[in-house]
Image (tube, helix red, strand yellow):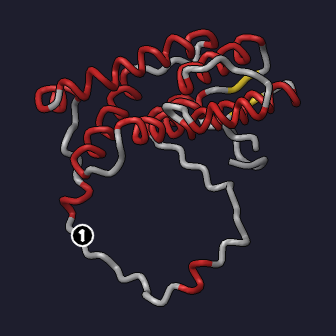
């Protein structure tokens, strides 16, 4: 997303994972010292085939995971409804599938994987300039950190270090700062 791009509709966001590539660290030259080249990995077509097409398929295999993810999303939706940004069934299903694949490959702890899902599927839906968006961001911050949102930067840093979903909490802080300074916020504006 940049100034030449129209905002994505919620319909598009529901079907795609959003990944930000706007953090640039030019001073990172460590990769230049790596002697081993990267070799291609051969994978078969089954690697990219979906195991689950319907949530019912996953639920029969792992009802506990589906219920745990759903419970987290119900809490998040409580905050999102304030600005009519709540997620629906498609996003719930996609996040459940993501979490199932995460478990199968043993990639991240539940909280880390859920943090990625929140960043990729939920926070991009939030934008606006009114009091409801301010309160929504504050409510999300509290859900992600178990702490009240405070303007004190030192306290925010401490909260982020102990947050349940630190990446998402950090993005919420960034979005709230933009709302306070510019009068408008969006996931996309940095």
- Identify the element where label 1 is drawn: loop
Q: Residue furthest left?
A: 60
Where's residue 130, x and y in %?
Answer: 78, 14
Q: Residue furthest bottom?
A: 35
Where's residue 83, x and y in %?
Answer: 63, 13
Residue holding disc 1 = 43
Q: Quadrant of residue 92?
A: top left
For this view, does 7 lie left or right of residue 67?
A: right
Marker count (numbered): 1
Which of 45/179 is in front? 179
Which of 153/67 is in front? 153
Where's residue 61, x and y in %?
Answer: 12, 32
For this view, does 115 lie left or right of residue 69?
A: right
Quadrant, the C terminus: top right
Q: Residue at x 52, y 30 (%)?
A: 122
For this view, does 48 lie left or right of residue 154?
A: left
**Is 140 drawn above or below residue 32 in the view shown?**
above
Q: Quadrant of residue 127?
A: top right
Q: Residue at x 46, y 15 (%)?
A: 75
**Is 134 drawn above or below residue 15 in the view shown?**
above
Which of 24/86 is in front? 24
Dot 1: few (<14), some (14–19), or many (≥20) neighbours within 10 Å?
A: few
Q: Quadrant of residue 100?
A: top left
Q: Residue at x 64, y 37 (%)?
A: 170
**Is 79 drawn above or below residue 110 in the view shown?**
above
Q: Residue at x 61, y 9 (%)?
A: 82
Where's residue 88, x and y in %?
Answer: 42, 20
**Is 27 drawn above or below residue 98 in the view shown?**
below
Which of 30/136 is in front? 30
For this view, does 17 lie left or right of residue 52?
A: right
């Amino acid at each position: 997303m940049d100034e030449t791009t129209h905002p994505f509709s919620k319909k598009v966001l529901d079907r795609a994972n959003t990944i930000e590539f706007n953090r640039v660290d030019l001073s990172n030259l460590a990769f230049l010292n790596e002697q081993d080249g990267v070799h291609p990995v051969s994978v078969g077509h089954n690697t990219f085939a979906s195991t689950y097409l319907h949530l019912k398929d996953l639920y029969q295999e792992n009802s506990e995971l589906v219920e745990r993810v759903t419970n987290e999303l119900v809490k998040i939706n409580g905050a999102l409804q304030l600005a009519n940004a709540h997620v629906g069934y498609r996003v719930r299903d996609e996040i459940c599938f993501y979490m199932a694949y995460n478990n199968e490959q043993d990639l991240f702890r539940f909280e880390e994987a859920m943090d990625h899902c929140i960043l990729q599927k939920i926070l991009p839906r939030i934008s606006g300039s009114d009091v409801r968006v301010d309160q929504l961001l504050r409510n999300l911050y509290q859900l992600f950190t178990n702490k009240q949102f405070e303007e004190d930067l030192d306290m925010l840093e401490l909260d982020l270090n102990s947050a349940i979903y630190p990446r998402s909490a950090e993005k919420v802080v960034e979005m709230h700062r933009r709302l306070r300074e510019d009068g408008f916020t969006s996931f996309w504006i940095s």
